[in-house]
């Protein structure tokens, strides 16, 4: 009979290089990768959100997204009745999106390099806020002009179940639990895989409170 120790060593995660779990041919979860950056990152994020606050956007189909959104960088992602697109201007203020803070950019570039994507030059960082119950339906990130660059996704606050699918919406999805400080990177042959987030469970995170914040860095232009 295998005891608890044998069970522990049977865990797939323990057979991966420390902290790096492969979830696709060119996709990785870097466990806790953002933790050493968070103290520097949070004040920068607060400044970005003071300039371009979270707002709930409406899809071209007329649905209000449950995750609230903002952006920073040269381009920000927006949706309205006219469609999904990147714009250099925040539609709320008609002003340029906040500049992408150095710590955020450096974290994204370092995580991309760790996952095998050297030379990442993100020009857009989407910021999603999920309160309990909020989710993101399966979708592909395909409004960017440059698919040769990966997507780097940083999770903060409440845990989430990330759904990582295939190239067709109907393909089977893997369920990947994401925690505060985890970073997911997908690119190359995996760049256009469908993905989404299951409804966030109730909870209170010791640093972020009753919410999950996700940052996704892309090369959009
Ligand atoms: O919140 C997440 O983990 C994913 C967000 C996402 O897929 C997106 O903003 O396009
Ligand atoms: Mn996405």
Image (cartoon, rainbow, N blue to C red):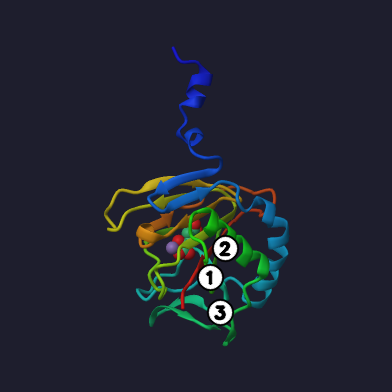
Give the camera-side residue of 69 and 65.
Answer: 69
Q: In terms of secondary structure, where does tag 2 sit?
A: helix
Q: Which residue is mark 1?
A: 121
Looking at this view, is 94 or 181 the one in front?
Answer: 181
* Mark 2 crowdedness (10 Å alpha carbons): few <14, some 14-19, many ≥20: many
Residue at image mark 3 = 74
The foreground one among 174 and 58 is 174
110 left or right, relative to 218: right
Q: Where 54 sits versus 42, above or below?
A: below
The reply to whether the C-beta atoms of the residues labelled 2 and 3 are less than 8 Å apart is no
Residue 134 visible in image: no
Q: How dense is the environment of label 3, judged by Cα within 10 Å: few (below 14), some, or many (20 and up)?
A: many
Whichever of callouts 3 and 1 sits on the residue coming sooner in the sequence is 3
Q: Which residue is mark 2?
A: 109
Which-is-in-front pick, marks 3 and 1? 1
Distance from Cα at disc 2 to Cα at disc 1 = 7 Å
The quadrant where ligand 2 appears is: bottom left
Q: Residue 132's quadrant in the figure?
A: bottom right
**Mark 2: is the Cβ under 8 angstroms from ligand 1?**
no
Q: Are marks 2 and 1 in contact (CB under 8 Å)?
A: yes
Position of residue 30 measured from the top left corner of the image (x, y, whole percent): 54, 49
User: Which residue of the protein is positioned furthest toward the bottom in this rendering?
Assistant: 94
Secondary element under disc 1, as helix, strand or loop, is loop
């Amino acid at each position: 009979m295998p005891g608890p120790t044998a069970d522990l060593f049977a865990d797939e995660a323990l057979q991966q290089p420390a902290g790096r779990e492969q979830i696709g041919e060119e996709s990785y979860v870097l466990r806790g990768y953002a933790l050493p950056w968070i103290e520097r990152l949070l004040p920068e994020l607060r400044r970005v959100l003071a300039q371009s606050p979270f707002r709930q956007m409406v899809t071209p189909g007329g649905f209000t997204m449950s995750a609230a959104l903002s952006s920073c960088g040269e381009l920000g992602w927006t949706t309205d009745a006219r469609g999904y697109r990147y714009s250099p201007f925040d539609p709320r203020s008609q002003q340029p999106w906040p500049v992408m803070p150095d710590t955020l950019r450096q974290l994204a570039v370092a995580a991309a390099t760790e996952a095998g994507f050297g030379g990442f030059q993100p020009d857009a960082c989407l910021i999603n806020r999920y309160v309990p119950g909020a989710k993101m339906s399966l979708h592909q990130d395909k409004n960017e002009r440059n698919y040769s660059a990966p997507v780097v996704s940083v999770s903060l606050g409440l845990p989430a179940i990330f759904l990582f699918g295939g190239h067709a919406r109907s393909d089977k999805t893997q369920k990947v639990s994401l925690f505060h400080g985890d970073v997911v990177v997908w690119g190359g042959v995996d760049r256009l895989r469908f993905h989404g987030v299951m409804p966030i469970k109730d909870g209170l995170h010791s640093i972020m409170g009753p919410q999950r914040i996700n940052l996704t860095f892309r090369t959009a232009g």
